[in-house]
Amino acid sequence: MTTWYLEQTDPALIKKGGTPTVPVDVVRAEIPSPELSRFLYTAVGGDWWWTDRLPWTWQQWQDHLDRPGVETWVAYVRGTPAGYIELDGTVPGAVEIVYFGLLPQFAGKRIGGFLLTTALEHAWSLPARWPALPAVERVWLHTCSLDGPTALANYQARGLHVYRTETEPAPAPTDTPGPWPGAHRPR
């Protein structure tokens, strides 16, 4: 498995994505909601082996989301969640795009580049919403070879650059967990 770490060190480096083929509204979930965040995490990540948070309790989700500088942004298409962004600005000077992605039925509608542009803009402007946080010096994220086939290219097209690559032996993945047990969607 290969993991790529990408960063951006100046908001002027953001390269905007194209216009989605459907109207998209991106709204911040200002009230921390473990239920919403877990839904988004499993609905988006279930096909990409996102499993690290599956055992979290409601309280673990709440504690994580309550931290100053952690934000969830949800993309909606005609009132339906289409994807999301989770930002973590709890490390001084840095904002991590911890999770980012689309629900499967919204792939191929040019939402990904638009949503990633939005993620970068919101990451760079995080201290405007959290005045106690210091200025952002870098925005970063990581992705891996188990992620969506267009993820790395989208990150690079939006102006992020790879600063570290790690490769480690990993067993060939089996079926992904899907959004809930027994709901695996074939690719």
Image (cartoon, grey):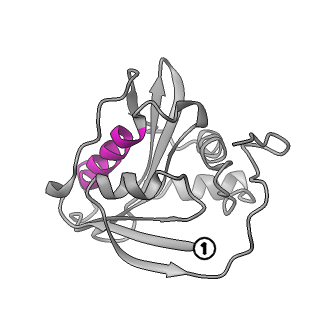
The quadrant where residue 173 appears: bottom right
Q: Can residue 130 be seen here?
A: no
If the image is split into quadrants, where does the C terminus sit? top right
Q: Report the quarter where the N terminus lies.
A: bottom right
Residue drawn where x is 51% and y is 72% of the image: 3
Is residue 114 shown in magenta? Answer: yes
**Main SS, magenta residues:** helix
Q: Which segment did they paint magenta? A: 112-128
Classify mark 1: residues with Cα within 10 Å, few (<14), some (14-19) or many (20+).
few
Identify which residue is drawn at 50% across, 38% down: 83
Q: Indicate the position of residue 21 as horizontal and vertical percent values.
A: 38, 24
Residue 98 position within the rendered picture, expressed as x and y whole percent measured from the top left: 47, 59
> What is the quadrant of residue 131 in the picture?
bottom left
Say which of 19 and 138 sits in front.
19
Q: Is residue 4 magenta?
A: no
Q: Could you tell me which secondary element the residue under label 1 belongs to?
A: loop
Three-letter amino acid code at disc 1? Answer: Met
Residue beneath the point at 18% across and 57% down: 13
- 138 or 143, which is in the foreground? 143
Q: Which residue is mark 1?
A: 1
